[in-house]
Amino acid sequence: MKKLTTLLFILLTFTVFSQEKLSLEDCYILVNKNYPLAKQANLLAKQNALDLEIIKTEKLPQLDVEAQATYQSDVTSVPIVIPGSTIEPPNKDQYKAAISVNQLIYDGGLINASSEVKNTLLKTQQKQVEVNLYQLKEQVNQLYFSILLLQEKRELLVAKKIQLETTLNEVKAGVKFGLLLPSSDSVLEVELLKVEQQFTEIGLTKISLIETLSKLIGHEISTKIILENPEDSNSLETENKRPELELFQLQKENIEASEQLIAKKNSPRLVGFATGGYGNPGLNMLDNSFQTYYMAGLKINWNIFDWNATKKERKSLLVNKEIINNQQEVFMLNTSIEMNQQQSEITKISAFIESDKTIIELQNKILKSANSQLKNGVITSSAYITELTNLYEAENNLNTHIIQLLLAKTNYKTTKGISLISKEEITH
């Protein structure tokens, strides 16, 4: 029993721990799974299956039932008299009930071509859903890295608070023994209260961003969540793998399938038929009595002239293909422009990071000197806080630029249609 309790505790601890961490890739997976638009892929597949079943029914026997009763103002009669023979004209009231069966024997591949159009259309529509979901990645990126930046700011704020508390204890000791002015510790206590306000601001902002991200990915996220840095060592110089390119290709394939369908429309259709009925008169129009009858045979239908409708439909498809090529060209141009801008942003932020490291190194030296001067009563607590704040701002700028660079590289790869980038690639 004790072992079972221990095992359950370990599993529970693991579950809670796993729920407290979230990666950017997890967000991508969740948004693709839970965003309402994702349901369309399955709905489109169901619709396509029904459409294919409808098309296939054309291969099955077609059964028609017909019944009619008529009264005619005149009927066919024989205008001559034949000696020894009496030919009665048909009744003016006539009745007929019949069942006809038509079986398609040959359609020139029209049904198969129609099915292929439906299948290529399904692939195109599902790819469009994928494209729309992919475009949500930029929103996920912005929210994710905004929360990640708040995490970094909070860690720096914790370090600043610890530094202030350590210095405050030292200053209080100096005030107690008369080495420092009595108000020196009050300045530090005020600064600590400001730090607490910053903690509150960061916490509330993080909660708001987490709630927005939760709604976007359709998954409840704890406010204590720890977001993981994206990890990927791929180079930025890779080929474009955006799903839009596959969408353009599928749209062209759908047009090609439609061209094949148009080519089959004017193919001859061979149908076998059989009709059985009961009526007055039957097939013998000169017999004025109710009779059963049947008829069977083959018929062919071939539209040899359609007023150039087929030719115009093909021209329309060619224009549509040119439109798709133009859309692809525009997409590639806009993507290229966007990537150039992102590369410039990456270069600029990278330069800022190098400057930030130098500034932090120099500011650490200044703060170390200020700390010594404060203990010896050479400068006031306000002067020390100024230097401490300068160091905090410099470290905050470095972390901000690192997160911005992570975001810029992730956005670049999102624009390219490829994977993520790790923080280690930047800091090293």
Image (cartoon, rainbow, N blue to C red):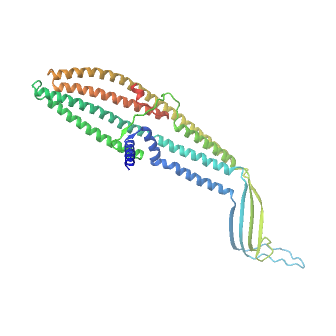
- Residue farthest toward the right in the current orientation of the protein: 83
Q: Quadrant of residue 255?
A: top right
Task: From the top left corner, tell me how far across and down residue 145 is, in percent.
Answer: 38, 36
**Can you name the residue that lies furthest to the left here?**
178
Residue drawn at x 44%, y 41% is 26
Given residues 62 and 3, the one toward you in this image is 3
The residue sitting at 15% across, 27% down in the picture is 171
The count of marks equals 0
Residue 278 placement (x, y as % from top left): 74, 73
Q: Depth check: 16 or 82 in front?
A: 16
Where residue 365 sits: x, y (%)?
26, 20
- Residue 312 lies, with reference to residue 423, above or below; the image says below
Give x and y (percent) for residue 209. 34, 41
Depth check, front residue: 363 or 77: 363
Left/right of residue 421 with respect to residue 314 in the rendered view: left
Q: Quadrant of the C terminus?
A: top left
**Quarter of the figure with residue 24:** top left
Residue at horizontal 26 percent and vertical 25 percent from the top: 391
Q: Left or right: where does residue 154 sit relative to residue 299?
A: left
The relative height of residue 404 versus residue 75 in the rendered view (above or below) is above
Q: Can the viewer see residue 72 in this picture?
A: no
Residue 351 visible, this angle: yes
Residue 92 lies left or right of residue 127; in this view the side is right
